[in-house]
């Protein structure tokens, strides 16, 4: 880190507490020092993580403990000095905790970890289904023969929406994010043109996974926000603020 810019200065920068001159100095250093930029991002992420987690309670408890201790002590100069020193130690420890948490999240958050949290689509089992091409696609999907689903879908000149959705899900299952997103967006366009709502919520949900697979983390984050902003969305509870936060980390990493 730049020797003139320590973690306390970076925290003040994030909280907009610096003088205009010091702020310019920090921004100049950030433009020239990639390591300093990474430390600032780690600090930002860890602060957000604390807002999203139970760690706020720990920090509040530490602050309360200090205030209680201060109120029960006499106010002579030695005690004030001792209390101030203790407060500085707490502040330093919390700052290190922030950076450590940010670094941990930065290192451990991976696309694979996020993808593993997604529910796999399950084809409803219907009794007495005829052996149509769509039925064959459903059976192949249930048997996890995703390449066969793609082959059956490719051989049909006019694919029904349900068949197209199974093609998209099969692409997701074998890791073809780009192809899955293309199919899902096409289904979304068809719904809009026809003023239909065929698997609208499912399309929204699996678009997130598709975007993550193809490395489009900005679109994935926007899709999560779209789902979470709709209180009646079927998959609202499957995606939380932590997911959006982790996607933001991936956007920084890659």
Image: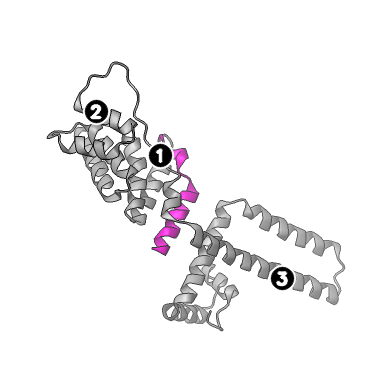
Residue 230, numbered circle: 1
Q: Earlier in the sequence, mark 3 or mark 1?
A: 3
Query: Which of labels 3 and 2 is toward the front?
Result: 2
What residue range appears in magenta? 234-254
Q: Is residue 124 left or right of residue 11?
A: left
Of 206 and 24, nearer the camera is: 206
Q: Residues within 10 Å of mark 1 (few under 14, many from 20)?
A: few
Work out whether residue 244 can be spotted: yes
Callout 2: SS: helix
Callout 3: SS: helix
Q: Which residue is mark 3?
A: 89
Q: Is residue 97 left or right of residue 70?
A: left
Task: Kindly identify the residue that appears in the image at 42 percent across and 78 percent down.
Answer: 31
Residue 115, numbered circle: none
Res 227 → quadrant:
top left
- Pointer 1 with pointer 2, Cβ within 8 A: no
Q: Position of residue 19 (x, y in %)?
A: 53, 78
Q: Is residue 111 left or right of residue 180?
A: right
Residue 136, numbered circle: 2
In the current view of this chain or complex, which residue is farthest to the left? 157
Q: CA distance from mark 3 to mark 1?
A: 44 Å
Q: Position of residue 76 (x, y in %)?
A: 86, 74
In the current view of this chain or complex, which residue is farthest to the top? 128
Residue 206 is inside the magenta segment: no
Q: Is residue 252 above or below residue 117?
A: below
């Amino acid at each position: 880190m730049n020797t003139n810019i320590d973690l306390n200065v970076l925290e003040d920068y994030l909280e907009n507490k610096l003088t205009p001159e010091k702020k310019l100095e920090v921004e100049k250093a950030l433009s020239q020092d990639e390591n300093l930029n990474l430390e600032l991002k780690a600090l930002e992420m860890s602060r957000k993580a604390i807002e999203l987690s139970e760690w706020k309670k720990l920090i509040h408890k530490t602050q309360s403990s200090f205030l209680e201790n201060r109120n029960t002590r006499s106010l002579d100069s030695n005690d004030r000095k001792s209390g101030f020193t203790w407060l500085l130690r707490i502040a330093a420890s919390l700052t290190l905790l922030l950076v450590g948490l940010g670094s941990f999240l930065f290192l451990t958050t991976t696309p694979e970890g996020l993808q593993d949290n997604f529910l796999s689509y399950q084809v409803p089992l219907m009794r007495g289904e005829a052996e149509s091409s769509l039925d064959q696609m459903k059976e192949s999907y249930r048997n996890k023969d995703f390449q066969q689903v793609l082959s059956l879908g490719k051989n049909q000149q006019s694919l029904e929406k349900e068949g197209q959705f199974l093609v998209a899900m099969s692409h997701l299952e074998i890791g073809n994010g780009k192809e899955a997103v293309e199919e899902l967006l096409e289904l979304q366009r068809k719904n809009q043109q026809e003023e239909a709502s065929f698997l609208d919520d499912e399309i929204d949900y699996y678009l997130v996974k598709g975007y993550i697979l193809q490395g489009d983390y900005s679109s994935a984050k926007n899709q999560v926000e779209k789902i979470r902003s709709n209180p009646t969305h079927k998959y609202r509870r499957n995606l939380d603020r932590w997911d959006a936060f982790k996607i933001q980390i991936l956007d920084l990493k890659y």
